[in-house]
């Protein structure tokens, strides 16, 4: 069990407010904050190059830390600046020709959809949604109906940006692999709140962000590309870190996932992200998942008793994102009124998960995403304040 007093004292600002936006940008533990600020200070003292050299061992060890956390080998890890960057680096590297098909879940995230539609329009490929089952999860049977050897990519969102749904990754991946499709997992909303291991999930690549459930700094992300999948990929944006200029007309690409990295990155932010990974690892990802699920379910159960409030979370298995609407009160108004009471929630709009929101006739939702550092009493306070809104 997570020691609530310890994690709360590591997160000083969590006592001043009810923070329910770890699906947006979480509160970092002080270990992360100290690392980032400490490194920025050191850069100001000795210059960025010397400061980085002093931390070379830690930076190198980071690949091992991320690999241990995400269930892959250290050479399958690249650090990036966001989940969108990670996702796009792989997608851009995947060959795509006219007539190719791409399958997506109905909770596909807008930025992924934009990249997919932008590129498929240029090459003459198609993007098709996989129907969901009655719980709202991707339906493996429906996927099997759609699969053929022209399916180049299955883009799967583990947890959507707008609700508590958890998609069944392993089943989808196994089915997709039967026809040789590449499986790219958007683990942006799952990493840090659920167990996300590439080896267990069987995916070819996965994209993660630092600032959400991992509680890392903004502007950080991780990309995992499994070794067998690299043979099918041709990295698009490579610099002198990803390749070596050997002769006037010859370069040699790196053979590990760092081929996707650029030479330049925010060292302080990277070190902060590594602290966040270590912090999560020390708590235990299964312990985190249990605590997060507990807080979220407490919120759902509480909100369900409030007249005029509807909880909209889909799925058989549910995670830390709680989505709801309040009759007669626009989502933004709910957010702003709660803000005045030091409760932070956000609004999810139709354009961030267009297929799903349109299908359900929902223009907007209020999103509350409690991490393990939110106390059960704070969840009850949140529910009481929502009840008081009407
Ligand atoms: C937030 C989010 C992203 C994008 O993450 P960035 O780090 O902002 O690039 C991708 N997918 C889902 C499901 C998200 O919620």
Image (spheres, rainbow, N blue to C red):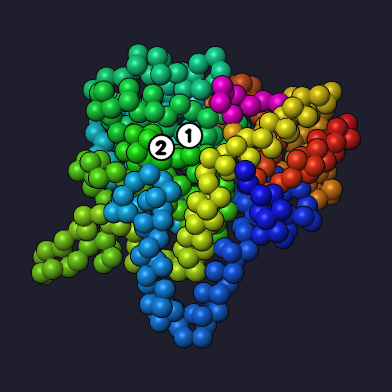
Secondary-structure class at tag 1 = loop
**Residue 101 % position (x, y):** 31, 26
Residue 367 on image: x %, y %: 68, 37
Q: Is residue 250 shown above or below 334?
A: below
- Tell me the element at label 2: strand
Residue, x 34% and y 34% (percent of image)?
Answer: 202
The numbered mark, 1 or 2, whose residue comes first in the sequence reads 1
Q: Is residue 390 visible?
A: yes
In space, the residues marked 1 and 2 are separated at their CA atoms by 7 Å
Horizontally, residue 192 falls left or right of residue 312, namely: left
Q: Residues within 10 Å of mark 2 (few under 14, many from 20)?
A: many
Q: Tell me residue 145's x, y (percent).
A: 35, 13
Q: Is mark 1 within 8 Å of ligand 1?
A: yes
Q: Is residue 372 left or right of residue 189?
A: right
Residue closest to the eye, 63 or 333: 63
Q: Looking at the picture, how far across and down is residue 143, in whole percent?
A: 38, 19
Seen as rendered, the residue at the extreme bottom is 45
- From the image, which quarter does the C terminus lie in? top right
Q: Which residue is labeled 2 in the image?
A: 185
Label drawn at residue 158 = 1
Tell me: 340 left or right of 79.
right
Q: How many marks?
A: 2
Q: Is residue 21 above or below residue 13?
A: above
For the record, the magenta segment spans 311-318
Mark 1 vs 2: CB contact within 8 A: yes
Question: In this orientation, which residue lies closer to the viewer: 60 or 311?
Answer: 60
């Amino acid at each position: 069990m997570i020691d609530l007093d310890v994690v709360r004292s590591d997160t000083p600002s969590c006592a001043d407010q009810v923070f329910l936006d770890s699906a947006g940008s979480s509160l970092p533990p002080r270990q992360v904050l100290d690392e980032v600020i400490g490194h920025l200070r050191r850069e100001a003292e000795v210059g960025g190059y010397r400061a980085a050299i002093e931390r070379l061992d830690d930076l190198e060890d980071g690949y091992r830390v991320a690999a241990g956390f995400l269930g892959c080998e250290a050479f399958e890890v690249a650090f990036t600046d966001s989940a969108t960057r990670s996702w796009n680096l792989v997608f851009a590297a995947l060959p795509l020709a006219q007539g190719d098909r791409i399958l997506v879940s109905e909770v596909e995230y807008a930025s992924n959809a934009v990249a997919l539609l932008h590129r498929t329009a240029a090459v003459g490929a198609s993007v098709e949604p996989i129907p969901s089952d009655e719980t709202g999860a991707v339906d493996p049977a429906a996927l099997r109906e759609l699969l053929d050897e022209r399916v180049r990519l299955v883009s799967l969102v583990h947890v959507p940006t707008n609700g508590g749904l958890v998609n069944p990754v392993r089943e989808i991946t196994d089915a997709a692999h039967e026809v040789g499709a590449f499986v790219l997992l958007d683990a942006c909303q799952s990493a840090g709140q659920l167990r996300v291991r590439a080896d267990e999930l069987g995916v070819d690549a996965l994209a993660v962000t630092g600032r959400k459930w991992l509680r890392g700094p903004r502007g950080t992300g991780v990309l995992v590309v499994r070794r067998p999948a690299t043979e099918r990929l041709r990295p698009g944006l490579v610099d002198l870190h990803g390749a070596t200029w050997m002769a006037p007309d010859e370069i040699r690409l790196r053979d590990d996932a760092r081929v996707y990295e650029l030479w330049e990155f925010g060292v302080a932010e990277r070190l902060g992200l590594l602290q966040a990974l270590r912090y999560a690892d020390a708590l235990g990802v299964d312990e985190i998942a249990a605590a997060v699920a507990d807080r979220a379910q407490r919120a759902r159960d509480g909100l369900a008793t409030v007249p005029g409030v509807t909880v909209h979370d889909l799925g058989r298995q549910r995670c830390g994102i709680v989505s709801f609407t309040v009759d007669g009160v626009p989502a933004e108004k709910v957010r702003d009124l709660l803000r005045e009471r030091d409760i932070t929630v956000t609004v999810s709009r139709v354009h961030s998960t267009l297929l799903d929101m349109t299908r359900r006739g929902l223009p907007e939702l209020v999103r509350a995403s409690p991490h393990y550092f939110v106390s059960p009493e704070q969840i009850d306070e949140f529910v009481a304040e929502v009840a008081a809104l009407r």
